[in-house]
Structure formats: C-alpha cells, structure tokens
Image: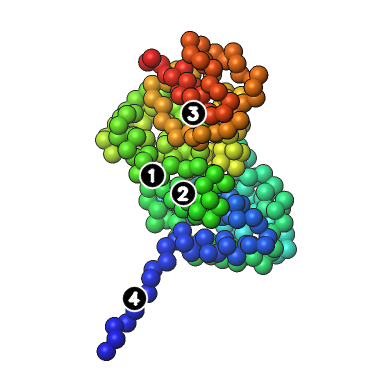
Amino acid sequence: MAAKAKTKEVSMEEALWKSADKLRGSVEPSEYKHVVLSLFFLKFASDKFEAQRARIIADGMEKFADNIAFYTKDNVFYLPPESRWSYIMENAKQDDIALKIDTALFTIEKTNPILKGALPDNYYSRLQIDTVKLASLLDEINKIDTTKDKENDIIGRMYEYFLSKFAIAEGKGKGEFYTPKTIVNLIAELIEPYDGTLYDPCCGSGGMFVQSIKFIEAHHGNKKKVSIYGQEYTNTTYKLAKMNLAIRGISANLGEMAANTFTNDQHKDLKADYIMANPPFNQKEWRAVDELTDDARWNGYEVPPTSNANYGWILNNVCSLSRQ
C-alpha cells in the first residue's frame, strides 16, 4: 500500500509571496515587498492596539480606552478609527480602498511621532493597483494572527524573505543588498555592543540594530546604554528601517531623510564606539572624478578611486570610530 504523500506546510512568508505575486501586471515585482510590508504593518499595529484596548477595558478603565498615553507607555501605537484593520477590511472591496489605506497610514504616523517618516506617503493611490487584486491581498493578510509574534520579529522576517526572493528573481546586482541574519548575529557576537554608540552607515532595514539589541537582551545587558545611529540611501528602505525599529521600541537616529552617506553624510561629527555594516561592495562610479577629492574622511590617506567604493567605505568607517 502506497504511503500517503505528506502535505508540505506553507510558511506565512511563502503564502504572502504567492499572494503578492498576484499583483503581477498591476505592480512591478520590485515593489511587492513595499506593498505587502506596509499592509502587514497596518495589520500588526492594529492587532497590538486591539489587544491593548481590550486589556484597558478589562481592567475597568474604559474611559481611558482612547487615551494615547495608555498605549504608548507599553510601546503600542494608538490607532484612530479610520486606521484600524477592521475598518480597512470593512471597505476592502470599495473602489477607494487604496485611498483609505493611504489615509490610515498617514493618520497613524501623525498620531504617533515615533513613526515620523516611517510610513509611505500616498503610496497605494499612486500605484493604482487593481482593486480586486488589492482586496485579495488584504484577505490573505487578514488570515494571519500577528499576536503569535511575541518577539515583534515579524516585520524583519517578512522583509528578509521578500528581499531574498526579489534578489533571486532579479539576479545579483539588480536587487537590493541585504545581510543574512546568521552573519549579523556573528558580527554582534564578535563586537559585543553592550554600551556606547553604535553606527551603521548603510543600515538597510535596520537588521544590524535589531540583532544588536537582541544580543544585549540575551546577555542580560541594558539596551538603554546603547545609542543607535544609521543612514540609508534608498527612501523606501529608509522607511522600512524606521518601521522595523519602531515596532520594537528601539530608539535610533537615522537622519532626517534617506541620503547618500558619501555625498550627504548626516552624522559627519559622529564618533561611534561600534560600527556594524555590510556596504554594497564594488560600487562603480560612486562619485564623480572631481567630487569628494578633499573630503575630511580621506585625510592622511589616498583619495578612494572612482572605480570602486570599497576603500571609501573603509575610510568612512575609520573616520567615524571613536577609538582609532
């Protein structure tokens, strides 16, 4: 008698990728992760909000159920009615659902200052996604119970999965660069960032910072003793980094905007105790021939060649260290 074939369990990440892939024709594959992650954040934040609201009411403090302070004290974002997932799902099949999603994200950011610059601005309306496909994606995300994610690691997991899938689909050099979690963990174990200033000049979605804080917590350290600074060139990834750190209650200075570390260094006076970085290696034409030739970061060293930015990244980091 033939044995029954085992049904392969589909992971949450894989299920969402397949759902996002249905956007093909409406959205470029390179946009999948940004479309999905912002919606996923909305569901995640709403689930946290509803759980906190239920606790407040259960404790006999219903009159404080709409008091923002009763949410922020526990690192929970307060969501106005038009930003809640239940409202989005009630209107998921409406022609103006993209506008409602944009409004929800805008309102959450306005209500929670820690999210300033973290969420997309008028993103879904600009994409003009087919309403039926967007509703289908919302249905898939609605099936996920984000409350199971006790360590608030779900956004990071989703981002890493989508980024790796895109990198594979597009080929090396066409997608974004990201650092596997195993490598980040190794770096944290090697430098042991227990206290002081931590800096990543090309921070991506903030994975180096997240794993550093996890390292500190795993070794019973005090994460309040670490000051975090970073910079990211790509605007959508900059927003993801701010989102990624905010949901974990990690305070960080990522600069006022997404910017090129070489041409617009937003932490030029910083002297960090630790630098964790995985720069985009072998960048070509990273500066013009007559650009940055007298930059203070090269003082005492040869000016990095325009053909390859590796030496430039090394000198940037050397200059940014407090102990040289």
Q: Nearer the viewer, mark 2 or mark 3?
A: 3
Q: Secondary structure at mark 1?
A: helix
Q: Residues within 10 Å of mark 2 (few under 14, many from 20)?
A: many
Question: Gap in Å between the C-alphas at discs 2 and 3?
Answer: 24 Å
Query: Do the numbered discs 4 and 2 sit on residues whose CB atoms are within 8 Å?
Result: no
Query: Do the numbered discs 2 and 1 sit on residues whose CB atoms are within 8 Å?
Result: yes
Amino acid type at image mark 3: Asn
Image position of 194 (left or right of 236): left
Residue pointed to by mark 2? 160
Q: Residues within 10 Å of mark 1 (few under 14, many from 20)?
A: some
Amino acid type at image mark 4: Lys
Question: Gap in Å between the C-alphas at discs 4 and 2?
Answer: 27 Å
How many marks the image carries: the answer is 4
User: Which quadrant, please, contains the C terminus?
Assistant: top left
- Give the x, y percent position of residue 254: 53, 30
- Give the x, y percent position of residue 103: 67, 49
Residue pointed to by mark 3? 310
Dot label at residue 181: 1
Q: Nearer the viewer, mark 1 or mark 3?
A: 3
Q: Secondary structure at mark 2?
A: helix
Image position of 172 (left or right of 187): right
Q: Quadrant of residue 121?
A: top right
Query: Do the numbered discs 1 and 4 sit on residues whose CB atoms are within 8 Å?
Result: no
Q: Residues within 10 Å of mark 3 (few under 14, many from 20)?
A: some
